[in-house]
Image (cartoon, grey):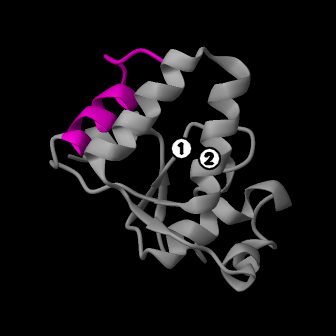
Amino acid sequence: KSSSGASGILLSLSQKRKIHPFTSNLVLEEVKRNISKKFSEKELIKFSNWIKNAKPKIAILSEKDIFLFNEVVATKDVHVLGGAHKVNAKFLVTLDRKHILKIKKDRRLPFKILTPGELINLM
């Protein structure tokens, strides 16, 4: 994606320590897998550099963490919500309109689900 888009702005802010990123080991594995499939090695290196510079807090998820939200979202995405819950995130930022963003109004969630643009608008 464009470095001048909302996602790029959030990644840049995290590298400058203006915002504090949180993620999980499973999300990082998924991102690496997707970058490897869809983009060049250059993009994988950029992602590795972001991790090194932004130093996100990385939660290691247990099975209990992963399946905490299996009634809320598709099985393949429960780890994303579980990770946000484990790190006590205020916001879960995603571009996944098909699965995660459509549940953003769920009152049972202890965090708000937003797009990158929505988070920037809150700042």
The residue lying toward the viewer, choosing from 82 and 106, is 82
Q: Between marks 2 and 1, how big is the CA–CA gap? A: 7 Å
Which residue position holds label 2? 101
Tag 2: residue type?
Leu
Q: Secondary structure at mark 2?
A: helix
Q: Look at mark 1 in the image and give the residue it sits on.
A: 94
Count up the numbered dots.
Answer: 2
Residue 94: image x %, image y %?
Answer: 53, 44
Seen at 71% across and 73% down, the residue is 66
Where's residue 100, x and y in %? 66, 50
The earlier-in-sequence mark between 2 and 1 is: 1
Q: Main secondary structure of the magenta part?
A: helix
User: Mark 2 near mark 1, Cβ–Cβ under 8 Å?
Assistant: yes
Classify mark 1: helix, strand or loop.
loop
> What residue is rendered at 54% in x and 62% in y?
24
Corner quadrant of residue 98: top right
Residue 21 x/y as whole percent: 34, 54
Q: Magenta segment range?
A: 1-15
Relative placement, left or right, of 122 versus 77 is left
